Image (cartoon, coloured by chain):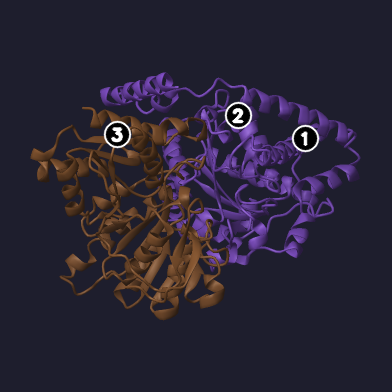
Chain colours: A purple, B brown
């Protein structure tokens, strides 16, 4: 098991290809046919294009605050390639690859960032929770889902995400502890993108890495190069198999870099420098995978044309979101409870009376 | 107490920054920390420049954990420091709620006064900025309901500065809620020197005779717009800025209602079990025989604050305030 071979206590990082796309450890490379590799690259490319366009839609004032994913695509695309339809995704907000693999549409994502809660009503994504803003709180939900899976003897895994900053929250430790005690099938991923908004990971913990935290809870942990699709794929394959077989939870620290801002409201130049950004740019997951495919001679597509096609698709879904049914007063009230309490009905009626007054005043 | 008379135009953000700067400079026991509060100066830049000026030992980034931020502040406060901690948003204060309710609010009473908790917990609150979930809430009633806490909400740069300095100097723990919607929307001449505004005192902003309107935070500005409409309609409104939620200034409110006989309460939090509910209870208890119309609350629905597309339904607008003022006056 690679979890045994790459001990976080020794600060080892599991990596299969280098920045030039050269295979470092052929023996551990996953046995993937060319088609699967190409599909994964395309999923990463699509996520990148969608993400870049989302930022530009926000800049045009057509969407509100958006948290870009760029630079972190390999992690969630690898999870998407491993997960089964029934597995439960418990996301934060930088796992676009896994969201899309789950069946969430860009239209839904855009709708949310246009300020419509209907965007969290993922009609086609089976077993996926809405994203969670209160940091690390969602990890406990994954553990509860893990308990249900175990209790109902389902053949499922819950996979949950958190960022490097989230590991400082009490909920992080509580989730790992419960998962360990209950031995539930949960795969935890820390996307260590080096910053919690402005705070670097070195100010977040004195720990030599984040994967080592697994030791304190008696569960396996591994640090993986999160910009290496193949390493992430192998780590997820083992983690999902291990959890699905009833062995309990695992923790993966995926080492990566947030190429963009925390959100479109953030300005990273306040807290990090160009040199660092340029250094990490060399480890971009898309560039590495492309170099790998070029060396193998398996990439034959015209990438520019492909990007054009992706842009058209993103535009189409964005327009669908923009043309979504206008927000109604009912939408504020109707999902607060299974059945609307009388007092809420009264508040709505009073507001309608105000609107009538306002209309008559014109 | 007024210091030197030099004035500068400040936003609310700058005024709070200035208050922190003054206290950091004059009192070595003051420390400032929170998520992104150090190097970056906070996501709203309220603490900008303070680390450079006062050093990393006194103004710093904490790891990401609200319970730990509040809990460590208690430890500092009872051992000789005066921490001013930032929780990043209203909706992120809840992981710290346990420490606030179970310890911050009780330390004085539990130790029979042996330990005090002179700390300030400050956070941006309120809606109207098209924010994501958990970034638009007004939880003042949650905190005001906890015995042992004082809850302060300024509505202007001047008040923000004076109240913040008073909060830091208070030996009681202070929840200091900052109306983020008007962080930069209002500019005002503010005295550059040190001054305080007493905690627990409301302020009559406009004197009037027909109806009392009580509000606080970002709603003051909306009320002032409604007052223009009221004036055009020939209605004389007395506008009161609460400034401190608890201890609530009953005297100012009751005296006003005794004069006008009517009260309209404006706030963006959900209506039920709110500061509005408390104000209605106060006027019923203390000015019952003076009331000439039912007290009215113009407050948020008992719902989650909707995201941007639906937020306009939720947010209290000047015309809605005027509508209720007119109905109350014409009762």
Q: Residues within 10 Å of mark 3 (few under 14, many from 20)?
A: many
- Whether callout 2 and callout 1 share a subunit is answered yes
Residue B28 visible somewhere in the drawing: no
As measured in the structure, the alpha-carbon distance from the residue carrying label 3 to the one carrying label 2 is 47 Å
Q: Quadrant of the C terminus of chain B?
A: top left
Q: Residues within 10 Å of mark 2 (few under 14, many from 20)?
A: many
Question: Circle 1 sits in a helix, a strand or a loop, which is it?
Answer: helix
In-image side of B259 versus B87 (left or right):
left
Which residue is drawn at the image coordinates 8% and 39% (left, top)? B289
As measured in the structure, the alpha-carbon distance from the residue carrying label 3 to the one carrying label 1 is 60 Å
Which chain hosts label 3? B
- Using the image, tell me which numbered label, if any, was put on residue A319: none
Q: Earlier in the sequence, mark 2 or mark 1?
A: 1
Q: Residues within 10 Å of mark 1 (few under 14, many from 20)?
A: some
Which chain hosts label 2? A
Q: Is residue B179 above or below residue B267?
A: below
Question: Circle 3 sits in a helix, a strand or a loop, which is it?
Answer: helix
Q: Of residues B301 and A70, which is closer to you in this image?
A: B301
- Using the image, tell me which numbered label, if any, was put on residue A104: 2
Q: Is residue A311 above or below residue B9?
A: above
Q: Residue furthest left?
A: B289
- Where residue A16 appears, as percent x and y from the top left, is 76, 52
Q: Quadrant of residue B219?
A: top left
- Where residue A240 appears, as percent x and y from the top left, is 58, 40
- Using the image, tell me which numbered label, if any, was put on residue A42: 1
In-image side of A293 versus A73 (left or right):
right
Give the labeled residue for mark 3.
B325
Residue A95 visible somewhere in the drawing: yes
Question: Circle 2 sits in a helix, a strand or a loop, which is it?
Answer: loop
């Amino acid at each position: 098991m690679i979890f045994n071979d790459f001990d976080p206590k020794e600060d080892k990082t599991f990596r299969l290809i280098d920045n030039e796309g050269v295979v470092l450890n052929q023996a551990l490379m996953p046995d993937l046919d060319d088609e699967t590799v190409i599909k994964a690259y395309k999923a990463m490319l699509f996520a990148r294009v969608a993400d870049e366009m989302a930022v530009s839609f926000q800049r045009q004032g057509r969407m509100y605050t958006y948290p870009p994913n760029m630079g972190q695509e390999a992690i969630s695309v690898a999870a998407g390639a491993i997960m089964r339809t029934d597995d439960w995704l418990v996301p934060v907000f930088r796992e676009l690859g896994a969201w899309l693999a789950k069946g969430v549409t860009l239209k839904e994502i855009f709708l949310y960032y246009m300020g419509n809660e209907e965007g969290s009503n993922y009609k086609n994504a089976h077993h996926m929770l809405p994203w969670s803003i209160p940091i690390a709180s969602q990890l406990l939900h994954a553990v509860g889902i893990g308990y249900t899976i175990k209790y109902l003897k389902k053949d499922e895994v819950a996979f949950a995400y958190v960022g490097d900053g989230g590991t400082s929250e009490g909920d992080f430790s509580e989730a790992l502890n419960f998962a360990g005690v209950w031995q539930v099938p949960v795969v935890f991923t820390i996307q260590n993108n080096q910053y919690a908004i402005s705070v670097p990971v070195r100010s977040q913990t004195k720990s030599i890495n984040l994967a080592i935290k697994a030791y304190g809870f008696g569960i396996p942990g591994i640090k993986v190069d999160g910009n290496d699709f193949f390493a992430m794929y192998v780590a997820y394959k083992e983690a999902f198999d291990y959890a699905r077989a009833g062995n309990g939870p695992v923790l993966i620290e995926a080492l990566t870099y947030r190429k963009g801002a925390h959100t479109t409201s953030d300005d990273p130049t306040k807290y990090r420098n160009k040199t660092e950004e340029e250094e990490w740019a060399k480890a971009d997951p898309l560039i590495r995978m492309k170099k790998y495919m070029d060396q193998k001679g398996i990439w034959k597509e015209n990438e520019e044309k492909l990007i054009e096609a992706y842009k058209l698709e993103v535009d189409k879904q964005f327009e669908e979101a923009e043309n979504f049914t206008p927000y109604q007063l009912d939408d504020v009230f109707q999902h607060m409870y299974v059945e609307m309490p009388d007092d809420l009905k009264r508040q709505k009626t009073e507001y309608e009376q105000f609107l009538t007054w306002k209309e008559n005043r014109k | 107490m007024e210091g030197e008379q030099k004035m500068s135009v400040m936003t609310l953000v700058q005024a709070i920054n200035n208050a922190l700067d003054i206290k950091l400079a004059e009192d070595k026991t003051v420390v400032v920390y929170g998520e992104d509060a150090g190097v970056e100066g906070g996501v709203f830049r309220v603490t900008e420049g303070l680390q450079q000026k006062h050093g990393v030992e006194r103004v710093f980034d904490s790891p990401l954990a609200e319970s730990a931020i509040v809990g460590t502040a208690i430890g500092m406060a009872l051992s000789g420091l005066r921490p001013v901690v930032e929780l990043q948003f209203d909706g992120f204060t809840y992981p710290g709620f346990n420490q606030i309710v179970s310890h911050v609010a009780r330390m004085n009473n539990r130790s029979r006064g042996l330990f005090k908790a002179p700390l300030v917990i400050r956070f941006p609150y309120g809606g109207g900025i098209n924010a994501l979930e958990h970034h638009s809430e007004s939880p003042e009633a949650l905190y005001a309901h906890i015995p042992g806490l004082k809850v302060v909400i300024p509505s202007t740069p001047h008040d923000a500065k004076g109240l913040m300095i008073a909060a830091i100097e208070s030996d009681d723990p202070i929840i200091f809620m900052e109306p983020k919607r008007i962080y930069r929307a209002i500019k005002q001449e503010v005295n550059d020197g040190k001054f305080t505004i007493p905690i627990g005192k409301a302020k009559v902003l406009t004197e009037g005779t027909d109806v009392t309107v009580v509000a606080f935070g970002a709603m003051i500005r909306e009320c002032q717009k409604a007052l223009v409409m009221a004036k055009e309609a020939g209605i004389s409104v007395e506008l009161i800025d609460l400034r401190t939620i608890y201890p609530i200034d009953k005297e100012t409110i009751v005296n006003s209602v005794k004069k006008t006989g009517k009260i309209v309460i404006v706030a963006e939090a959900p209506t039920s079990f709110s500061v509005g509910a408390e104000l209605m209870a106060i006027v019923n208890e203390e000015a019952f025989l003076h009331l000439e119309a039912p007290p009215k609350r113009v407050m948020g629905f008992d719902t989650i604050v909707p995201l941007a597309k639906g937020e306009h339904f939720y947010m209290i607008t000047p015309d809605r305030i005027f509508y209720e003022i007119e109905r109350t006056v014409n009762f």
